[in-house]
Image (cartoon, rainbow, N blue to C red):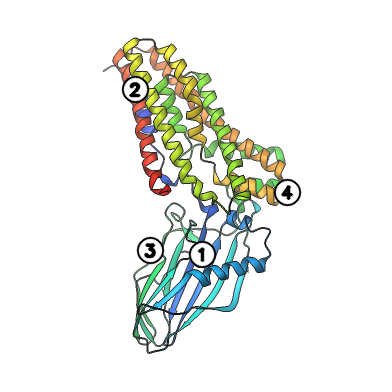
Amino acid sequence: MSIRRLIGLAVGVVAVISALPAPAGAHPLGNFSINHLVTVRVSAHRVDLHYVLDQAEIPTFQERDLPKTLVLARKRAEVSRRLSLSVDGRGVPVRLLPAALLTHPPGQGGLPLTRVELWLTASLVKAPREVIRIRDGTFPDRVGWKAIVAAPGSGTAVRSSVPSSDPTHGLRSYPQDALSSPLDQRDATLVVQPGDGTLIAPNGHVDQSASTRNRSGDGFAGIFADAAAGKGVLLFLLLAAFGWGAIHALSPGHGKSMVAAYLIGTRGQVRDAVALGATVTITHTIGVFALGLVTLALSQYVLPEQLYPWLNLVSGLLVVTIGLSVLRSRVKSAHHHHHHHHDDNLARKSIVAMGASAGLLPCPSALVVLLAAIAQHRIGLGLVMIVVFSLGLATTLTGLGVAVVSAGRVTRKLSVPPRVALVVPAASALVIVLAGTILTIRALPQVA
């Protein structure tokens, strides 16, 4: 096979590989999370519990107008109602102790976090030869890290179903994969006998950790924090926001693969690449504002993080629909040999839908910036930063699209066999359908 033919086939292979869906962790939900940890200690005549809550920026923002006493009262009520303990199958009352800590460590974009520590106890009325079960049912609908760990008591020998090690160091740092697959340990069983304060527990896996303290310097939210605080020249900070948006578009899950496959499948032009980039930008910006509205006004009816699975589902269905349209167009073009006319008609119908599916999921970091701007009464600055960030996102996607279109023109000038010229776009369309199907299948369990 000649070099020219190999180049043409290589373009098709790149389209197939690049159109595969991004991993599920493309849009981490760390800014939405409510994380909690229970440490249980069984002694001869009582069970002591230490409950720690680490609440991220967005749920903390939703409580911004409440006095601290009311916030703490709500947390205490939640724990009192949903943290349960049983001994040999019988429920035992758990009593909240008066001591409590409520602090607000700094988070992204100048927004605070919420950290609560509570202490509880339960009495054991007989000698400790029992099976104790603990259930942490607090905040059942919120994403986040949930864990129970055991600690040695006095006068007992305990065999625990949960580990004694805590890789989060009291919810102050998390393993690197915590946001993509957070621990969800809500139940613990402890078999208790008289002893000398011994504890047998499974080994806990300790991974590399990333600190969650003072996250205001992270990424786009950190740029806004500097701008709101007057640190640095505004022009350079706007350029930094633009650059961060451009780089952010290279991370998984931002539609670049679908844009490339779409342009190859439809034999798009430069104007199509520009239109796709603009549509992704507009959709992404509108999505940030819409999710901000939900956070501000509708959070008592729907949680913002609950919308992401539905957005994933809609995006997947859009991709499947577009892929089927492109594939149908390729088949008709092969039979009737009027590519350009048919491509133009297809582009008018599907370019907006393709751009919308690529930009449908708003970036959580941009949402944090919007909420931080509202909290700090810098709404104008926040809106400008988000638009500039989105323009950076569009520039990368448009540049990628133009590169794909240019590569397609080069290959069409080469002596590519007619069959190869027809197969490559059809293969790209088929991969779009496959990728959209996978996205849809992944989203279905999350909305069920």
Of 216 and 84, the residue lying toward us? 84
User: What residue is disc 3 on?
Assistant: 205
Label at residue 426: 2
User: What residue is disc 1 on?
Assistant: 171
Mark 1 vs 3: CB contact within 8 A: no
The earlier-in-sequence mark between 1 and 3 is 1
What SS does tag 3 mark? loop
The amino acid at mark 4 is: His
Q: Nearer the viewer, mark 1 or mark 2?
A: 2
186 left or right of 114 in image: left
Q: Nearer the viewer, mark 1 or mark 3?
A: 1
User: What residue is disc 4 on?
Assistant: 377
The amino acid at mark 2 is: Ala
Question: Looking at the picture, does residue 62 appear above or below residue 155?
Answer: above
Quarter of the image where one finds residue 162? bottom left
> How far is the residue under mark 2 from the one under mark 4?
51 Å
Of 448 and 185, the residue lying toward us? 448
Question: Looking at the picture, does residue 185 appear above or below residue 352?
Answer: below
